[in-house]
Image: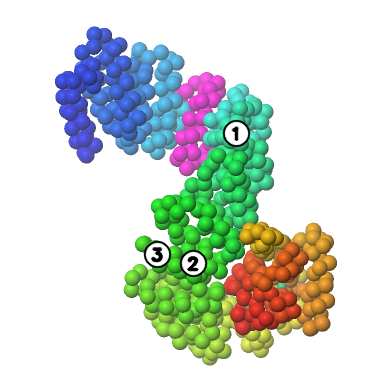
Amino acid sequence: MQYFRRLSIIRSSFRFLSLSSSSIVNVHASTTHEELYEINKLMNNYNNSHVPIRTVALFEWMSNIINLKPDFICYTQIIRACGEINNLKLCQKIHEFIDKDQTLQSKEYYQLQIKLIYMYAKIKHIELAEEIFQQIKNRSFDINLYGTMFKGYNMNGQPEKTIRLFENEILNKKTIQLDAISATCVLSACSSSHRLDIGHNIYNEVVRLKLLEPPNIRLATAIIDMYCNCGSIDRARKLFDQLLPIADHITYSILMKAYLSINQPVQVLSLFHQLQSSSSSISPDAVLYLHVINACQQLGLPHQAENIHRAIPSFIIEKNLSVQTALINMHSHCLQVNEAYRLFSLLKQKDNHTLANLIHGFAINGQGQRALKLFEDIKLELKLNEQTYKMILYACKFTDGLVDEARKIYKIIPEKYKTPDIASIMVSILARHSLFDEVQSFIHQYKSKSTDVSSLWSALFMVCYHSGNVQYAKSIYDQIKDDPFLLLLFSDMTNSLLSNEIFNYFQQQLPGKCRTEIKNNNTMNYTVYEFHDNDLSNFPLLNSELNIIIDELKSVNINWQLTKNDLKQLFCGHISVRLAIVQNFVLNPSSTVIQLTKTKPLCSTCHEGIKHLTLIKQCDIILKDDIRIHHFHNGKCSCHDKF
Ligand SMILES: [Zn+2]
Ligand SMILES: [Zn+2]
């Protein structure tokens, strides 16, 4: 009803305007041709100005009031307007009107059918678009028709239909060749359906048909996007490098996002540095900065975080709340909690996600008291969610002596948020304080609320493992025997046999990584180095330096020599972190602080070795693993050996 009311208002105002002012539309022009020309021009203006309802009003007025017959161009304008207005009846009315027009030439009618297909796709009635498509005879000669249908399916979230149509009518029949637009559409469908086979086939066709000559950035971006989403990022990168001179924001953004999704932040930073180089004409926007900030967050290295923060123009930070919160999250994860806290205090709109990240920053740094103070200050200002409650308990877990505070917080957590995840942190806190009776009754009580208590037992076992409480660990064996990771740890702590199946399972896991940033000689710049747990043979020089360290550690009964059945190596990896440390000693022997981030959890053998290295090398080592931050200083660690 509202639509018709608006239509009627516009029509009456239009009638008044058009009849009284010849400067808007000259309906008194001497010929029908001139009248139509004026009307089509006006419709085009309305469509370009995003007021399609006026085009519709004008169409109704000309066909009903002044009885002027629309021509082909007029139809294209009204179809375009209908595609913008989500009104099926109106679209069908125009469709019927066109179908009844016997004066249209067959070529014109065919062109209008393609436009009607697009119109129905746009208003999400793809079945009506399909109907028209099926009615068209001899359709295997026009790639434009297929391009429209592909676009329609993609717009309606049916990429698999795009691929099927391409396979059935183009790939198999081979009567028609792709053009840049249709190839872009099928590539986009392959990207969302992860069909590398078809996507790669199209890329070969694009090369054969020379569709990238001259360079076509939209098509190239579609290929890169397809390879990224189909897990073939190396191919995407190769094409990106070839097309570098024409790469734009979107191309960079797609590639950066893909690297972030597979945890390769170093590649994101190198793309960013490439972008900053003098040869690039692109100035990064907020979206690209967000990718780079996220990359720094993944890296967890403070100097990289500082550099990126400094590189972002202040107007971009001030204008974008998402950039501000991303910076807080980044600094929280990069050992810069003071900076994160400063930015958080300035934030006009505080939210749970950012708060939780900041509390997490305090937690992994062992600054539980600061986290609690922040929590107390803000709990009346913000309606806290599950994530924030989880992080505040996490903060109590990593700082000794906060068991009373944790109990109080757990009490005020709304019942709906007392998930197994949150309850298991509570178990950890109690167990770390050796309150095993309380742990047992806590788990017993929790069982009455939820049948899923496996994560609570896991948390309890992890504390036993790290504190070497073999007896207690054995007593809860039945509760953990379904978890391969816990069984691995159990075998490690009790020197018992591990099944070949589990051993092989962990051996086949992707190698872990360790990253470090090392100051370049005589400059303030830091270079990021990344090592993998299967990298030993790739760095012969570092390997021989590592052997010297292994000998030094042997003298204090710490065994860093690799052995075949070392169970700790299965979860820690050992190699990447050790190579990263040696790289620091080699490149910067006078360094007083080494920064490391490790993607897998640290084992106690590496932990003991690093403690000793800080003593003999008189150098602090700050290591962030996937659980917390260890600040090694003078033979000790800030975690007090509680992981
Ligand atoms: Zn290790
Ligand atoms: Zn530690």
Q: Is residue 386 above or below residue 64?
A: below
Name the front one of labels 1 and 2. Answer: 2
Q: Is residue 480 magenta?
A: no
Give the mark, 3 or 1, whose residue is nearer the N terminus. Answer: 1
Quadrant housing residue 377: bottom left
Chain part drawn in magenta: 134-163
Mark 1: give few (<14), some (14-19) or many (20+) Cα within 10 Å.
some
Q: Secondary structure at mark 1?
A: helix
Answer with mark 3 or mark 2, whichever residue precedes in sequence. Answer: 2
Residue shown at 76% from the left, 61% from the top: 535
Label 3 – label 1 distance at C-alpha:
55 Å
For the residue labelled by badge 3, is the local secondary structure a helix, a strand or a loop?
Answer: helix
Compared to residue 28, the image places residue 386 above or below, namely: below
Q: How many marks?
A: 3
Q: Main secondary structure of the magenta part?
A: helix
Which residue corresponds to mark 2? Answer: 339
Does 256 sit above or below residue 563?
Answer: above
